[in-house]
Image: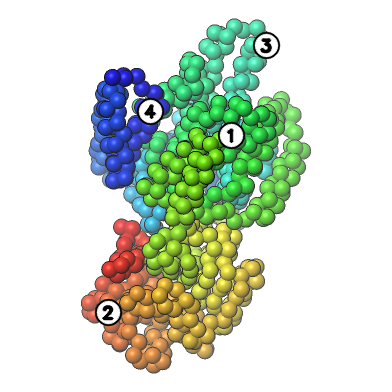
Amino acid sequence: MKQNFSPIYLIYLLVLFYFLIFSFSWPLCILTLASTVLSFCRGYYGLLLILLGFALFFFWVKEAERIKESRQPDKISRIKPYIDTIEVNGNRLSFRGETSGQDYQVFYTFKSQKEQEYFKKLDINVLIYFEGQLEEPEEQRNFSGFDYKKYLKSQGIYRLVQVEKIQGLERLDSFDMRLLRRQAILWTQQHFPRPMSSYMTGLLFGWLDKDFEEMNDIYTSLGIIHLFALSGMQVNFFIELLRKILLRLGLSQSIVFFIQVPFSIFYAFITGLSVSILRALLQKNLPMKRTVDKFSLTFILLLLFKPNFLMTAGGQLTMIYSFLLVIFSGKFGHAKGIKKTLLDSTVLAVGVLPLLIFHFHSFQPLSILLTLLFSLIFDFLLLPGLLLIFLLSFLGINLIFFNDFFIFLESIVKAVESLFQYPLVLGKPDVLFLLLLFGFSGLFIDFYRKKTWNLVLLSALFLLFFLVKNPRQASITMVDVGQGDSILLQDKWNRRNILIDTGGKLNLGSDESWKIASHKSNAEKTLIPYLKSQGIGTVETLILTHPDEDHMGDLEILSQKMKIKHIYISETALEKESFVKKLSKLKSKVHFAREGDKLPIFDGHLHFLATGLEGRSNNDNSLVTFGDFYGKKFLFTGDLEEEGERDLQKRYPNLQTDVLKVGHHGSKSSSKVGFLKNLKPQIALISVGKNNRYKHPSQETLENLSAENIKIYRTDQQGAIRFIYKKKGWTIQTVK
């Protein structure tokens, strides 16, 4: 029997075993079992022994992580920052640090501007003594949402440190590569204006600060933010530049390689030891002729010395990009010039698309052309130009007038983004669909010249993308937006959708400019990713129950990220000037909701029962909606309080419901006993922020609900709450 096997086949099986052990799923289990049986039938006994060894290693890593997490200390009082991770954002300080062999993510709020300035310019290693608390990182709170705890765990971090008071700092005389990187970043920020300095620190040292956040979002929207993720492009540039200089000086190939290796180690540290850099440097320096062997050995070395790298989106993306380049690099040898470059870019786009939509749920088709164009700009203009300008600055030659070029570049990028503002939203595939998409994408690339097969495979891919984008089951989801409200009604096959409120965060503001921090809106972290994961790129109907910030504060950012066709508001909402300003910026069609209006959804309609009480508070002016869907009644009350509840009972004395969205986040001013007795709900939904300052929901409201034997679901305790309709009726899912 045949005993030899391809190294790529080994990598394929290692990936299956890795995710089966660290992230189990039945589709993956079946595929792994089938692939292992096939290996046995082909006589790959040596391969099976290697897999067994790695499987034991993966189990050992998993168990070691479990033990380490269970043995975390209850308290620490000092920490040594990793100096190149220090980030100052307004009055907030964050960094990663180490004490007693354990890494932590640290946060602190500055007490004065003097403190802020000190840490902004800190260029020595220090030991910080402090008073503070250890906390567990936040787990996933929304379906398809970001799991901060899992992400930090992949970095070897199991606790957050919330520093309350810095008691003192001890200077350390030690010098390391992290300190050198920090000093290079500070030098750049102090000697060059923005945005030039941001591009310099990003492309030369792998560091993008908060001031680059707006452009970061724009590059992300256009699908080219990966150009800032230091990897093969920068590694090739710097290694080849070094080799050319040394060879021109007359050094032999062997001596050049001898110098190249320590330079690569230096470059890895100066750029932050990212996985993409380590991958590119290993592939560049491994003394093997075949690129496939270099890739395979690189993958194995990373698994052995950095086993958690495959649990991050960045680690997965850098490996699949490299894999596609290795496997298909010679496939288009018949093509020349621009045609070959376009084919290569298309292959990368198609091959990586399943993983991209799994993590980010959308795709910008224009990114294929933009990647081509900007790769040339970055590789042949920005990288050599910024390196030269940076080096000349040490001679006192500051070419800051080149900043005009970067201002012009950003104006062009913003103009392009305004024309192609909304990417193609494709939804999030589950594991089965992800595996199928990978399989058919690979076959499509492999058979691209066989027209019959091409058509069949392309049709299969379109069908798979359609099924991912359009969920087959109807659902109603209370999204966990913290201290706010946002509820999504999504019909079968994505035929219709209605969003009730956007959530939002009350901005308390600050009189002192130094305290103002840039940050992502709440919707960008919660609501928008969930909508995209459900295949929603256009909100057909948005109901804004009332103009409080926690219900409509993220309206503007939502409209920037996706189209909103129709918006329903109450007439009284126009009394709030800030709300009117927000509406005036939108291109959506605005409607005044009238009592008796109805919107088609599911097997019925969502009815407007109340549109506000004249002369009452904003909360009692909430739009109240009701729907009887597939045999279950739902009542959505916004921030309705006691007087609004009495008015609703008076207008609809026979109104009953199965599911009640509790008014005003469960405050004591809502959900009175008489109201609950009349409605007779079986389930109460409370949208409320974890550890919120208002102490919602009130104990009185909880007791009222319990007295009526109403099952309570709360976003602060269970995360997002979703009703899924199946043939036998509605089922309830919670994130926690």
Residue 583 appears in the picture as rendered? yes
Residue 344 disc label: 1
Residue matched to label 3: 248
Of circles 1 and 2, the one toward us is 1
Residue 345 in picture, x, y percent from top left: 59, 37
Q: Nearer the viewer, residue 328 or 667?
A: 328
> If you read the primary sequence from the N terminus, does the residue marked by circle 3 or circle 2 appear first?
3
Q: Quadrant of the C terminus?
A: bottom left
* Rendered position, 212 above or below 533: above
Residue matched to label 4: 9
Residue matched to label 2: 704
Dot 4 falls on a residue whose secondary structure is: helix
Q: Nearer the viewer, residue 296 or 504?
A: 296
Disc 3: CA contacts within 10 A as few (<14), some (14-19) or many (>=20): few
Q: Quadrant of residue 560?
A: bottom right
Q: Nearer the viewer, residue 735 or 211?
A: 735
Q: Nearer the viewer, residue 450 or 619?
A: 450
> If you read the primary sequence from the N terminus, does the residue marked by circle 3 or circle 1 appear first?
3
> If you read the primary sequence from the N terminus, does the residue marked by circle 4 or circle 1 appear first?
4
Q: Report the amino acid beneath label 2.
A: Asn
Give the Cα separation between the discs numbered 2 and 4. 61 Å
Q: How many marks?
A: 4
> If you read the primary sequence from the N terminus, does the residue marked by circle 2 or circle 4 appear first?
4
Left or right, 734 with respect to 489, comes to: left
